[in-house]
Image (cartoon, helix red, strand yellow):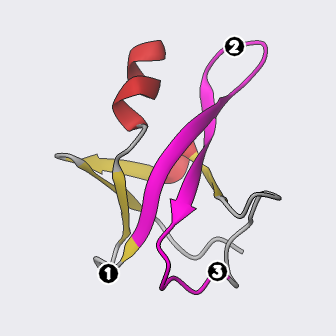
Amino acid sequence: MENINEALVGKTVLNSKGNIIGRIQESIKDNISGEIISVLILPAKELNLEKYTLTERGEIVFPFSRLSLVKDIIVIEEPLK
């Protein structure tokens, strides 16, 4: 599972319209299973953050199950809230 985490960190995240959401900062794992359940995304500066759940540090919290990998880019399914 560590290899997946290493592969995710730093990847650019786009929405389905091709707009840049940001870059993955880290993953959040389930304490029991060790599976990745969410990722933290450092948002792009021009992104409207109203529809996203944010951490206290301003990172977007996004469910791992709603990510799709396309080559070196991660695509997310919206809306979130």
Splitting the image into 4 quarters, where does residue 60 fall? Answer: bottom right
Residue 46, image x and y in percent? 48, 85
Question: What is the number of the mark on residue 49?
Answer: 3
Query: Taking the image as drawn, is residue 39 in sight?
Result: yes
Q: Nearer the viewer, residue 73 or 43?
A: 43
Residue at horizontal 21 percent and vertical 46 percent from the top: 72
The reply to whether the C-beta atoms of the residues labelled 2 and 3 are less than 8 Å apart is no
Q: Is residue 33 above or below residue 76?
A: above
Q: Which residues are magenta?
A: 21-49
Residue 36, image x and y in percent? 59, 29
Residue that badge 1 annotates: 17
The reply to whether the C-beta atoms of the residues labelled 2 and 1 are less than 8 Å apart is no
Q: Is residue 7 above or below residue 23?
A: above
Is residue 35 a member of the stretch shown in magenta? yes
Q: Which secondary structure lies at badge 3? A: loop
Residue that badge 2 annotates: 33
Q: Which of pointers 2 and 3 lies earlier in the amino acid sequence?
A: 2
In front of the other: label 1 or label 3? Answer: 3
The reply to whether the C-beta atoms of the residues labelled 1 and 3 are less than 8 Å apart is no
Residue at horizontal 74 percent and vertical 66 percent from the top: 53
Q: Which secondary structure lies at badge 1? A: loop
Q: Which of pointers 2 and 1 lies earlier in the amino acid sequence?
A: 1
